Image: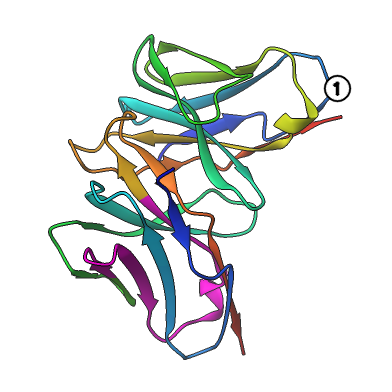
Amino acid sequence: GENVGLHLPTLSVQEGDNSIINCAYSNSASDYFIWYKQESGKGPQFIIDIRSNMDKRQGQRVTVLLNKTVKHLSLQIAATQPGDSAVYFCAELRSNSGYALNFGKGTSLLVTP
Amino acid sequence: DAGITQSPRHKVTETGTPVTLRCHQTENHRYMYWYRQDPGHGLRLIHYSYGVKDTDKGEVSDGYSVSRSKTEDFLLTLESATSSQTSVYFCAISGGSLGTGELFFGEGSRLTVL
């Protein structure tokens, strides 16, 4: 079935380096995507979103890139900090399910000193 | 933080017993959702509500029922809990305009079925 998936389950980066987390989606009709961050024992928290009519969106230290041609989404975190260690999920909007989000399986980001 | 409260936060129960999880919001949002989170599966939608007494099934609805008698409360019921329903359950709410899919999540309810 159509799904949202992640290329790598874990990613380890050094403090201060940039991180890139990737996500592939298969539903070409998806028109809205969100990245969430989940810390241990907590619920997912919104990081940044992007609509399909955009290629790039920037937030504070984070950038999301959308390549509709290859159905690929990425989250870039600049100058990664220890507090960025968490699981990151991409999600796509399902407009035919009460605007529920369809989540990928997540990538665990570990920031080492 | 969005005003979402889940209760109980932790529960241990036995196979075959009924369980109800409660989600309470203070944001007056229209949409409410129940997800479950399991290792290797990410977050999967169980049921959702788009208004009082208006609910629909998600992708993993078997064994679960929901009710929404008030805007602020969304209940998830396991009529007869099974070990496969051991999971962390998250409630989420959304009040964004059409096409704005941002969901705000509660802190989760960890359920263990023995």
> Where's residue A17, x and y in %?
46, 90
Residue B99, compared with residue B75, is above or below; it is below
Decide if residue A112 is on the left or right side of residue B72: right
> Where's residue B57, x and y in %?
45, 21
Quarter of the picture holding the N terminus of chain A: top left
Residue A59, compared with residue B31, is above or below; it is below
Q: According to the image, label 1 marks what residue? A: B14
Which residue is depicted at the point 47% across and 91% down?
Answer: A16
> Where's residue B106, x and y in %?
51, 40
Which residue is depicted at the point 18% across and 56% down?
Answer: A52
Residue A67 part of the magenta-drawn span: yes
Decide if residue B20 is on the left or right side of residue B69: right
Please tell me how many numbered marks the rendered image carries. Answer: 1
Residue A77, compared with residue B41, is above or below; it is below
Give the magenta part as a residue range. Answer: A65-91
Decide if residue A3 is on the left or right side of residue B106: left
Which residue is depicted at the point 22% across and 66% down?
Answer: A69
Quarter of the picture holding the C terminus of chain A: bottom right
The kind of residue tagged 1 is Glu
Which residue is depicted at the point 49% across and 51% down?
Answer: A44
Quarter-wise, where is residue A50 in the image? Answer: bottom left
* Residue most extreme to the front: A1
Q: Is label 1 in a helix, a strand or a loop?
A: loop
